[in-house]
Amino acid sequence: MIVAEAVGRALAACGAETVFGVVGSGNFHVTNALVASGARFVAARHEGGAATMADAYARMSGRTGIVSVHQGPGLTNAMTGLTEAAKSRTPLIVVAGEATEARSNFHIDQAGLAAAVGAVPMRVTGTAQAVTQVVAAYRVAVEERRAVLLNLPLDVQAAPYDGPLDLPARPLSSSLSSSPSSSGADGRSPGEEAVGGVAELAGALAAAERPVFVAGRGARHARRELVDLAERTGALLATSAVAKGLFRGSPWDLDVSGGFATPLTAELIRAADLVVAWGCALNMWTTRHGSLISPGATVAKVDLDAAALKTHVPADLGVVGDVAHVARSVAARLTSGKAGHRSPALAARIRDEGRWQAVPYEDESGDGRIDPRTLTIALDGLLPSERVLAIDSGNFMGYPSMFMDVPDEGGFCFTQAFQSIGLGLATAIGAALARPDRLPVAALGDGGALMGLAELETVVRLGLPMVIVVYDDEAYGAEVHHFGPHGHPLGTVTFPPADLAAIARGHGLAAVTVTRRADLAGVSEWLDGPRDRPLLVHAKVTREHGSWWLEEAFKGH
């Protein structure tokens, strides 16, 4: 067999079950070898979509994401999705053909391109080392939670493979799976250098009167351990946006900290005398530029990455280690539980005020447009609770993030580390394939929807029973509300109406246009029907002012 076939076999043996990509001559044979070895290939319509699908699939399944692309433009098309994955520390491998001949039209510095966005460039360098190098790349993705570019030079791919077939005896599992059953999946415990920090953290929790936990991406596998530790210490429970849903069902769940926080959540985090960030860097989004952390509060961080302990809001107390293991180690040092800030009265406040649906607002619907809050609250009530929600970026994004609930951390997929618009639909496809037991819901702005339009065909082709909600203000709303109040001309960021429902029908979707709440009857009809086609909800939303959370975010610009 040729090297390309050996590489495909090795990737499948390592655990590549689902592969996303666009096939060209440079990745044709390796992709076919993956399929022949049992992997499912999901053809995207654009490599950027393929990379984002793989990223979302990895986040929601706990498996390593695999992308297959052509050399040169195939890789450059995938770069935004690869950047998002690299920034999010998603275990991901992009398998790319590589033209090493400088005179080739396809030749670029692919390794340099990957390194520039934070991915790890690796390469199959010879006919005898290919399988060994594939396994090494897979281990980097899994064990270090990194996005890896695996370059396959065209001449090496085509040569006969003459090395050993020492394939892994079993698949290499992702180190920190986001699946609900994966607690403690990586098997690591705090190192010797962390033992002192564990003791110090246990002491701080024992002394704190109003502790709050803020769990992030690195804690999505550790719900059980964190809930147990919170019970022992009286801590309240919050998350960063990316971990939304992690503590759903707990009476002490404050939902999301930061820009999406309810008034009650902001009040309680500001009142904390100890804030413990678990796998969370406490960036400006999670802390509202630091304003949610009281000047007198102690900040503790637990993270696998030592650098995270001093970024954004620096830790007064830091522990390097896996969140689940550190939480267990801390709990073992605490002999008895305490109430902390918890009380029946506070539990009642969290129940009655702890979700955005309970926060009063003035409905601004009218003149052929629906208030996005009214729209989202209504959809939250209509759609099945067992859902997986994927959010694009833009002025609209706070509405589905704040007003639409999810059953757990496996119900929310938030590809926002790079803040690119246009990733939402591909995110929803990857999440849907990872969680076929749930209704996939994509929440998009009109700008992001039009950027990712090609993947509507993918949704239809795959037969996904997806609900795609487009919040249409006929503009790049973030720019309108950032620059408009200062009197700047807005012709470059506003657009004429587009019939997105007609575009969706042309791709084979069902569609409904919503300008008032009564129009959502079309969504109810779809839900009550066979759901044999995906549904696009074209919502023409009010646009007089920006979302309040975005106004808060602009303070950092």
Image: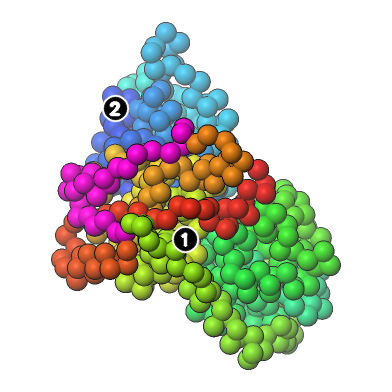
* Quarter of the picture holding the C terminus: top right
Q: Which of marks 1 and 2 is nearer the N terminus?
A: 2
Q: Which residue appears at 33% of the width and 57% of the height?
A: 368
Residue 35, x across and y down, in percent: 26, 42
Amino acid type at circle 1 is Tyr
Residue 156 versus residue 268 in the image, above or below: above
- Residue at which label 2 appears: 24
Which picture quadrant has residue 302? bottom right
Q: Distance between the residues labelled 1 and 2?
A: 39 Å
Amino acid type at circle 2 is Gly
Residue bounds of the magenta highlight: 491-515
Residue 213 versus residue 45 in the image, above or below: below
Residue reaching furthest to the front: 367
Q: How crowded is mark 2: few (under 14 residues within 10 Å), some or many (20 or more)?
A: some
Q: Which residue appears at 36% of the width and 57% of the height?
A: 367
* Quarter of the picture holding the N terminus: top left
In what element is the residue under mark 1? Answer: helix
Is 358 on the left-hand or right-hand side of 195? left
Is 457 on the left-hand or right-hand side of 445? left
Q: Is residue 376 visible?
A: no
- Residue at which label 1 appears: 399
Q: Which residue appears at 26% of the width and 36% of the height?
A: 32
Residue 402 versus residue 538 in the image, above or below: below
Residue 527, x across and y down, in percent: 23, 68
Q: How does the figure colour the protein chain or chains?
A: rainbow
In what element is the residue under mark 2? Answer: loop
